[in-house]
Image: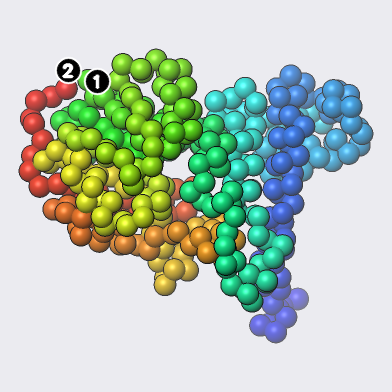
Amino acid sequence: MRFDEKNDLSGFAVVEDWLLGPVRLAVLETALELGIADILAETGDPAEAARRLGAHPGNTLLFLDALTTMGLAEKREGRFANTSLAERHLRRTSGTYFGGLVENLKTLQLRNLDRLAALVRQGPPAELKREKRLDEETHWRAAAHGLACYQRSGLARLAADLVAALPEAQRLRRLLDLGGGPGIAGMEIVERHPGMTGVLCDLPTVAEVAREEIAARGLEDRMSVLPGDYNALDLGAGYDLVWASNTLYYARDLPAFLAKAHAALQPGGVFLSLHEGLKGERTRPAFHVLSRLPLALEGQDVSFEAGQIARAMLEGGFQTVESRELLLPMGAVRLDVGRKAGALPVERLG
């Protein structure tokens, strides 16, 4: 049998894939709710898993099969086990457990799906309730622990790798982790550089979580916290390095704020920004465009275009800016490295 263009079903295959999105999310949420990964860590017998859940044996087996299809379980001769992915992110005792993060992202990314047509027709609401605004502090306090798991899952290591690859790496002594949330990335950077100290700046309730994480890691003598709105705070001075990832959305005047960060750096200091950079007239990467659409339609379109941060850095006083694209699991992001004129001291860290 031969399909011509009129009978081509490839378009329907794409639709089928889209339709599976809600199913996959529902399976993931159910696995988290039931604690399936914790049970499979102790028993691979589906009947025993059903008994522990107090669940229907046949439906438990069907659900475990679906988890296997999604790569969250393995099945051999009728018995099940966690995959490494499930061990890392679905075990409640894991430092990279994704339960809180999934709930937070679902709240942000899916909250307007039932009224997309109304928002398209009517436009953004005249006034957005305070609790729905992205800069609402209580939201970030609730999200901070989930963000800690996300940073532990790879962002912190990436941040430290990027800093270690800088030509100035051995001369960096003082870090400002700007809008760093729970601070895992900043701590990873500091730990890679003996003798380096760091300051984490974030909203007061988020800073409380950062203090907990710093204490748990035993870095109280090397990491301190500067609580408050970074737009209004005195950031201090004498930093060699500023790290900013997914936080510059909240700068009220981006060039002016980057000028403020520039002033906080000592001569030769480096500012690393890791944010999305939309291309194709703001139509790519798909992850950033689609995941933020429900927020954008209600008037919270915060995504940066490729080159926007680099231009603001130059406007804010940085002498040079280097930019490159990094491909991460959730899509391409843009690394912008701004340098202040001058030179850092040449002595190495002890």
Label 2 environment density (alpha carbons within 10 Å; few <14, some 14–19, many ≥20): few
How is the structure coloured here?
rainbow
Q: Give the quadrant of residue 181.
A: top left
User: Image point 47% across, 53% down: which residue?
Assistant: 331
Instruction: Relative to 165, say whether 126 is above or below.
Output: below
The answer to whether 194 appears left or right of 185 in the picture is: left
Instruction: Relative to 85, say whether 299 is above or below.
Output: below
Q: Where is residue 88 drawn, in percent x and y? A: 58, 30
The answer to whether 17 appears left or right of 273 in the picture is: right
Label 1 environment density (alpha carbons within 10 Å; few <14, some 14–19, many ≥20): some
Q: According to the image, label 1 marks what residue?
A: 194
Q: Where is residue 48 drawn, in percent x and y? A: 86, 23
- Location of the N terminus (image quadrant): bottom right
Q: Give the quadrant of residue 120.
A: bottom right
Please tell me whether mark 2 sits on a helix, a strand or a loop. loop
Q: Nearer the viewer, residue 188 or 318?
A: 318
User: Image point 36% across, 35% down: which residue?
Assistant: 201
Residue type, mark 1 in image: Pro
Please tell me whether mark 1 sits on a helix, a strand or a loop. loop
Q: Where is residue 345 drawn, in percent x and y? A: 8, 31
- Location of the C terminus (image quadrant): top left
Residue type, mark 2 in image: Gly
